[in-house]
Amino acid sequence: MTSSLFAVIVWLRHGPAESDSTASTYATWAIAHGRFSCSYPALGNHPIPLTAQLYPLLSGAIAAAARIGHSVAFPTVAQLGPGCENAIAVLDRWSVRAGAVTPTLMIGYSSWFMLLAGVVLVIRAIGRGRTWWEPVTLTIVATCAPVLSAVAVYFHPQDIAAFSLILVALAMAFQGRWVPTGIFLGLACSTNQFAVLALVALLVVVPLGRRLNFIAAIVGSMVVLNAPLVVLTSGRALSAVLSGTGLSVPFGTTVLSQLAPHGFALELLSRGLPILSTLAVAIWARHRLGAALLEPPHLLSLVALSLCLRLVFELDLWSYYFLALAGTLVLIDVAHGRLRGETLAWLALVNSAFSIVPWGVASVGAVDWGSLNELVPATFIVVALLVIARDIRHRRFRPYLLIWTFVMSIIFAREGWYGAPFDHGFPSWLWQLLLIPPALALASSSRGLPVIALSPSTSEADGRTPTQVVRTH
């Protein structure tokens, strides 16, 4: 059901989107047709760096099995040029003649099934599987604008795939299986480099006796996956392994970019500060909590904080940057056994800021997008007002809800219901200030929620995850 919901929303948005798709499609076509040496061609003036290798390998395998583009002969090595210097222009022409673009974009749906598996594995690893938590959590994730936008607005299924692998790694960590945890983290880092933040966090908390095997598993999985293509492409794939799409030319629209001059030093700060900050937070948390940091709520909170720190120091703020953070915040609540109103309010604000509805378009086919533009934020505000009225009746006071309603009303009153706040009228740095501090608070606070305690059989020495006993107070 949730898969159908995700697919329908993407279809209504006329997705999967072609925007940014060339980060992975060239590699997909080359791999699908056996031209591995040209899977990472010389970019030249191409504006979008190529993505890391796992997603192109998966999509290439699917494209080969589906025989995408096989109706037209694939370019020869000679046509691709020495060092594949002509590959981008040649593949562009070939893809049009072969009709390969749209079928290749459809492969992006596969990333959703990876995310579905990751979410379910985490829910079951924390002991809430095969309950109503599974469909509720998957529905929230499937309708989350940052997740949808990674397929419907921009073509970044590799971001969804990387987050999915992080979740699988966390599910393994909750069970004390540190070698599989390392393998999946290595695969995640070979899909999108923001996974390094989760890797740093887990590297600190892994039991000392298991750390060497953990590191070996990470390195081994990365070498096995990446080394062949690096060799076959004469080293051209190395930049994708190390940085992926992270070296895209920044627009410089966030707080950090407003405070410092643009250049290589600023980009280095933007990539280095989240890693250093995550390391510091993880060390502090390990010192403060000890073995209790291995509990699912604490470990999920640490990963959420690391993902949030990425957004603190980003130079741009695109909707899909929020997908991993949004999903992890929801899973923190699942681990505690209660969806916080603050989390739902934050998700509503994110969904409004990065709405996948094509703003400014009165209608597309049979769908009246203009009415949806008016309906979505209005519905959020009406629901909030109804909850506030109910609270008044029961003499309850929720400061966050009043603040949220005020902010939402101001944002949408300024440009009108038909103006997208993120695209018109409000700079990215302001949205950064509105969205990131609450996310940091949600990731680090669990006051008033059920407590998940460790059983007396906890053993840090052997690295086994403790049996979790849920006690609701």
Image (cartoon, helix red, strand yellow):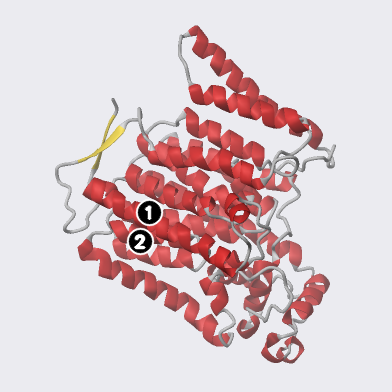
In-front residue for pair 64/360 = 360
Residue density around tag 2, few if under 14, some if 14–19, many if 20 or more, within 10 Å: many
Residue 260 % position (x, y)? 59, 58
In-front residue for pair 346/233 = 346
| Left or right position of 76 against 440 | right
Q: Residue at x 57, y 79 (%)?
A: 237
Note whether 382 is above or below 450 in the view shown. Answer: above
Q: Residue at x 16, y 58 (%)?
A: 461
From the image, tell me which residue sits under label 1: 170
Point out the image quarter for the C terminus.
Answer: top left
From the image, tell me which residue sits under label 2: 181
Residue 276 % position (x, y)? 41, 60
| Left or right position of 171 against 19 | left
- SS category of the residue bearing label 1: helix
Residue 385 % position (x, y)? 60, 18
Residue density around tag 1, few if under 14, some if 14–19, many if 20 or more, within 10 Å: many
Point out the image quarter for the N terminus.
Answer: top right
Splitting the image into 4 quarters, where does residue 354 fall? Answer: top right
Q: Mark 2 near mark 1, Cβ–Cβ under 8 Å?
A: yes
Residue 110 % position (x, y)? 59, 58
> Label 2 sits on what residue type?
Thr
- SS category of the residue bearing label 2: helix
Residue 402 appears in view: yes
> Label 1 sits on what residue type?
Leu
